[in-house]
Image (cartoon, rainbow, N blue to C red):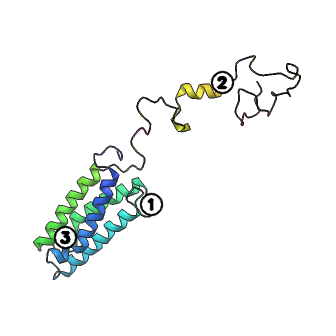
Amino acid sequence: MLREGPIPQAVQGLLEYLVGFLFVAAPFLLGFTDSGMATAASIVVGVVFLVLASTGAGPTGLVHQLGPPAHALLDAVLAVLLIAAPFVLGFSAEATPRNLFLVAGVGWLLVTIGSRYDRQPAAVDRPADEPAGTSGDPRQLSADDTRAIDAPPPSGSHRTAGSDPGARRESGPGTVGPGYGPLDGGRAG
């Protein structure tokens, strides 16, 4: 649900900053500074938008403290509060601030529904022609790659103590044989 919207998280974060600044400036730009409650509500909502934007874990966040699920929930709650504010706070008779809050609330609800609250890039960071497991990222190994890592070395591929007079013994519990990496977990070949 949180990863399927058409609005990238960076765009949503920029919109959050923009809406925050607009709400702080709205009483002065739209001329409803004479309405005390509407002015106070607008400035408080603007500050809340700015705090959400700056604490989000996305690319536009400054502090990266608010995870994507919590951010999505708070954005939805904020949208509902914007719609309810003119009626709950008593400025529903004043057209300009009421309409601002209603339009912004419905608009922000749509932005919240359409946003991707995902920090990771979409599916793949490697070129399409590069097979899984070759990018160096162990999290991108395919099942075949992991089977090859876990498989013991082919028989006869390791030396025993008597096969080469100058060689020391290379297999046994806790030793590293030629078919294993440095952390073989005590497996012998």
Query: How many marks do you count on the picture?
Result: 3
Q: CA distance from mark 3 to mark 2?
A: 67 Å
Residue where numbered disc 3 is placed? 86
The verdict on residue 41 being magenta is no
- Pick whichever of labels 3 and 1 is earlier in the sequence: 1
Determine whether 73 is above or below 141 in the image: below
Q: Earlier in the sequence, mark 2 or mark 1?
A: 1
Q: Position of residue 63 (x, y in %)?
A: 44, 64
Mark 3 → mark 1, Cα distance in angstroms: 32 Å
Q: Which mark is residue 47?
A: none
The question of residue 125 being in magenta is answered with yes
Q: Which residue is mark 1?
A: 64
Which residue position holds label 2? 151
Q: Amino acid at mark 2?
A: Ala
Secondary element under disc 2, as helix, strand or loop, is: loop
Quadrant position of the N terminus in the picture = top left
Q: Position of residue 127 (x, y in %)?
A: 42, 34
For disc 1, the neighbor class at 10 Å (few under 14, some 14 to 19, many from 20) is: some
- Position of the C terminus by quadrant: top right
Give the class, few, some or many, for how many residues have Cα within 10 Å of label 2's Cα (few <14, many ≥20). Answer: few
C-alpha separation, residue under disc 2 versus residue under disc 1: 41 Å
Q: Which residues are magenta?
A: 122-126
Q: Position of residue 125 (x, y in %)?
A: 43, 40
Amino acid on which the number 1 mark rests in the picture:
His
